[in-house]
Amino acid sequence: MKNKNKKPHYQFRRIVVLSVFALAIVGLFLRALDMQVINQAFFQQQGDARHLRVVPISAHRGDIYDRNGEPLAISTPVDSVWVNPKEIKNDLHRVTEIAKTLKINAQHLRNKLVKNSNREFVYILRQVSPDTGEKIKALGIPGVYLQREYKRYYPAGEVTSHVIGFSDVDDIGQEGLELAYDEWLSGEPGSKRVIRDRLGQVIDDVERIKTAEPGKSVRLSIDRRIQYLAYQSLKSAVKEHKAIAGSAVVLDVHTGEVLAMVNQPSFNANDRSQLKPGVYRNRSVTDVFEPGSTMKPFTIAAALETGRWHPKDNVKTSPGYYKVQGSTIKDMRNYGKINLEEIILKSSNVGVSKVALSLDQEQQLGMYMKLGFGINSGSGFPGERNGNLRTGHLSEFERATMSFGYSLSVTPLQLARAYSSIAADGVIYPVSFLRRDKEVEGEQVMSLATAKKVRHMMERVVSPEGTANKASIANYRVAGKTGTVHKFISGGYAKDRYLSVFAGMAPASDPRLVMVVMLNEPRNGKYFGGQVAAPVFSRVISGALRLLDVPPDDLKYAQKESLEKKGKSA
């Protein structure tokens, strides 16, 4: 009979259990040995691969400066917020937090993420401030990341907007000099390998794959001080005369550098809502117009170059009109017999037409072509127009109208460049938007004697007896010419819509600056170039001459003023 109190024997079971535990420990040890010693590199690579990411390193776009080193376009660091929809799909309820921080529509963002749920990269908002980026980062939402970028900023705002242009959100030049020198300004992005934690935050830089190369900076010919003067004066004139648009260009006579170029209406490239095609085009190089009486000095110059005409030679303009091939050319009144100097002073269409028709077509058009009309100035500005100058066989009426600025078209920049040849003693220089530190070779397009004679004639235009006395500048001699042009519309020329133009230079004895001002359709009752455009020239150039320390050349006026002041003080 078996003993029921005898305990069962578990020795075999103990051995089995202990053996299993021992094998498990050995297995763990071997696995640890394999992972930590034998195949450490492999498993490290596999682990890193699940957290390693190659991220771009944004390149700093080159800055743009004025001729004196003042910044006109700079790049500032910002963050762009992006998301991996696959990672955030379990946290879509937190979309409201993101939208609130970024001040965007939450429902729109949710729909965007759902629509792109199969993608791994979707931008939420580009170029937010670093402060906003830190707030997004602090939310700690898986799948939401920040990417460092650069945003373009324009310190002068609308004052330089038409010249500088702007770049897009990807820092690629779109208009103006940002586009013209985009290849020079653009940097070369780099890349690096980083480790991200489970929230996508970078916790370690592993290696730099490619170093980012910043873009090269550009120093322009623009003088920010003169640019500001031109901008304020033109804006004030457009507002005062209720004009629909306006343009102004200032050139350095001896270098061809553009010191100022402004247009109205303007825009601020820092506010992307203002970037509309009709506003951001640079009218000074893209819009053409008939220059009117501002062409007369060039026609007279062509006549003087033949050697058959002299400033005091007379032309009969009676009875105040002139019939050419069945069409009638008129003056404002009957000037009778006047000389070449008086043709410019009184702005006689009849007189200049008779002078033009006394020349061969080649002599007349040859002068216009040498001055750059109908030809691109070579400035390199995007979208620059060539203007229009017909060079085939012309009728006498066409040649006559060309002599006083109709039947051809120019840009404000072209007109300013042509006037610079008279200012530079007959030499014309290539136009440049970049600062020139070395002398540049120009082209002699008219003789020194002709340039000085025409310049002297234009001085009388700015005198009290001329049409542009409002262009005068205290203590400086000024030479210039007005233009009041009937605006061309569908079907012909409007009788009551005008372009008001003034082109001038100072100091007239040895010109340093040339400026062209054009106002499109002034509508407050005043429309003559001497009334509307000439005062803009006076305000801008008077300030510019002082900024550039150009000494006065009207010594008689200066001495008279000095004597008057001494008399008052005594």
Image: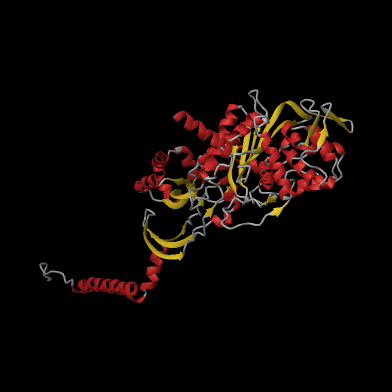
The part of the image, by quadrant, that contains residue 389 is top right
Residue 413 as seen in the image, left or right of residue 203: right
Task: Farthest residue to the bottom: give it.
Answer: 38
Q: Nearer the viewer, residue 89 or 140?
A: 140
Q: Residue 509 in the image: state x and y as whole percent.
A: 63, 44
The vertical placement of 426 against 32, above or below, is above
Which part of the image, by quadrant, shows the C terminus?
A: top left
Q: As rendered, which of 214 and 233 lies closer to the eye?
A: 233
Q: In this view of the protein, can residue 171 be seen by the observer?
A: yes
Q: Position of residue 20 (x, y in %)?
A: 26, 71
Which of the 4 image quarters holds residue 55? Answer: bottom left
Name the residue: 67% across, 27% down: 527
Depth check: 115 or 174 in front? 174
Image quarter (top left, top right, bottom left or bottom right) of the N terminus: bottom left
Q: How many marks?
A: 0
Does residue 474 appear in this view?
Answer: no
- The percent position of residue 91, horizontal first and vertical second, equals 39, 46
Quarter of the image where one finds residue 532? top right
Which residue in the rendered view is the most extreme toward the right? 325
Image coordinates of residue 321 in percent, x first then y, are: 83, 28
Q: Nearer the viewer, residue 566 or 553?
A: 566
Left or right for 83, reference 159? left
Using residue 282 as the reference point, say whether residue 125 is left or right of it: left
